[in-house]
Image: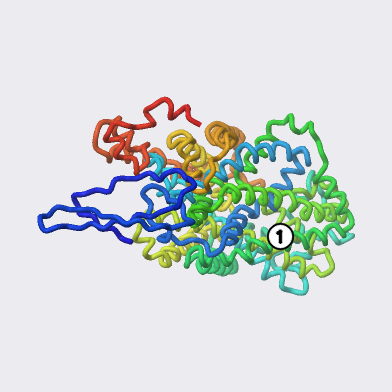
Amino acid sequence: MNIQVMPEHKLSSVVPLKQCNVEKKEVELILVKDQNGVQYTSSSIIPTPGRRAGPPGSGSEDERETWGKKIDFLLSVIGFAVDLANVWRFPYLCYKNGGGAFLIPYLLFLAIAGMPLFYMELALGQYNREGAATVWKICPLFKGVGYTVILIALYVGFYYNVIIAWSLHYLFSSMTSELPWLNCGNSWNSENCTDPRDPNKSIPINGSYTKYKTTPAAEYYERGVLHLHESKGIQDLGLPRWELTLCLVAVVFILYFSLWKGVKSSGKVVYITATMPYVVLFVLLIRGITLPGSMDGIRAYLHIDFKRLRNLEVWIDAATQIFYSLGAGFGVLIAFSSYNKFENNCYRDAILTSTVNCITSFFSGFAIFSVLGYMASKQGVKIEDVATEGAGLVFIIYPEAISTLPGSTFWAIVFFIMLLTLGIDSSMGGMEAVITGLTDDFKILKRNRKIFTFVTAFGTFLVALLCVTNGGIYVLTLLDKYAAGTSILFGVLIEAIGVSWFYGVDRFSEDIERMMGFKPGLYWRLCWKYVSPAFLLFVVIASTVKSSELKYDDYSFPYWSNVVGWGVAMSSMLFVPSYALYKILSVPGTFKERLAYGITPEHEHHMVAEGNVRQFKLRHWLAI
């Protein structure tokens, strides 16, 4: 019930007791005012079995929307984490970095950093029942990192939706008796187009088949879909292509109507988008292993070369792949888990969903490399000449292989449906992080969620129009490198430090115990406090050192475009120091008192006035 308190009186914050074997009770307060103006408080005890106390300062659990079913949440998390990178990046990295040997650093980083960070974000959102910004009521000085990850999620939506639009375009184009990338002679083909099936023409392969840009499939992608040949560079974008614009409109409408009613609607969409990729991968694998040369591809994928583990680049690839694959740091896991019931077992969810994600990555490699083996056999080249990653794999090499199969139209439709569903639920997650993060922070947006959802979707559409122009691939490449590169690594590093060190691993563990009735083990606490921050620091440094000049194939971007890119990256990262500075300057008192208010949970601010600040004591920093 609503409790009305006279303005001159304040409710003191009450920290919930640890879970114990007693009946849970709820206290109903009633304020009574007598004739002489003296206020009295009476109370009654209402037993409420089966419910644990929520976080300090939170309202009733019923005030926040929850998932319709537990499976809605699990499928949403899996759908977000399992995205295009599971198909177009992991298999190639595994092949390139020693095959089965690559699994050693990959699984190691999964255990010591991937799962702990995944678990931390799920628990953080579920306990506080807030989005990525307002969850930092636990340490207000760090609220800027919430805005950082929200802005990054928005940036990613600008270009990720375009990749989904490409998939939709390919899907529609596949609905013909003859696939448009099967041969030359189309309006978009150049005079240099060479059909690899033509015995009178040979393809002069110099190093790699994937570098040859005049096959029908390559020309369809770059000339028929992107119209890249009509642009001289990022300074010459041209107008949006109407075909891709219509596909982009369709994608944005799908996202809007999936999210406008909150998790009640999005939780039902993922029944299709999160499960369809597994059905398609299985079907493609069964078809793939029946093709000639498929076993050569699978053997190349699984070959074990332990000597590759001596190469630092292998470990860097494993670390970055684990981080980006699980999707920590985009505010999505925090947003999704904030709609869980308070007592939900998020520990089990973290183990289950992160494991499913990694198994999916490994499994997809069989479906990909069985077809690449067939492709290499058919073209008379080595596996290494057709093995690639990214858009080149799913929009050129794989479609070219499919086009040579009996019933190619069916296989193309199935494949691009998989890409479409892989992209849709990942994009839904990113947009939900933005919507939840800002509606929790600004109540006027929460009251008008449907309108705000439309504004967000329409805003991403307007910016994405830059990526569907003739030179749009250059804008997309720039955003992909800078919008969610160093900035997201920086954001998650600050997040891990804020939770593990300033809020405190011991206090965070007690929060988890209040939810689930058991405290995280020493392993998880050590990972949160020491291993995960060290891992993130390693990835930040490695990614910065490994960073190369911004290029797309043979095109080198002008200097000014790199400046713009760093401006995009800094625009999100600057929220961390700027908000911290704002927080310190906006609070009265000495610098020490201002700092104390900034690093103390909001429900404990009365302790600052009493001079009892736990972060100013050594035992806080030593506690695990």
The residue identified by callout 1 is 278
Q: Nearer the viewer, residue 100 or 527?
A: 527
* Relative to 250, residue 208 above or below: above
Residue 499 position within the rendered picture, expressed as x and y whole percent measured from the top left: 47, 39
Residue in the picture at 14% in, 57% down: 34
Q: Position of residue 261 (x, y in %)?
A: 47, 67
Query: 10 Å neighbourhood of mark 1: few (<14), some, or many (≥20)?
Result: some
- 465 vs 434, nearest the viewer: 434
Q: Where does the image place residue 18, in percent across and percent down from the top left?
A: 45, 43
Visible in this render: residue 387?
Answer: yes
Residue at position x 83%, y 65% in the image: 405
Residue 82 falls left or right of residue 367: left
Location of the N terminus by quadrant is bottom left
**Closest to the observer: 14 or 49?**
49
Q: Is residue 471 visible?
A: no
Q: x, y (%) of residue 517?
A: 52, 46
Tell me the quarter of the picture where residue 593 sits. Answer: top left
Q: Residue furthest bottom?
A: 177
Q: Residue furthest top?
A: 618
Identified by mark 1, the residue type is: Tyr
Q: How is the image coloured?
A: rainbow
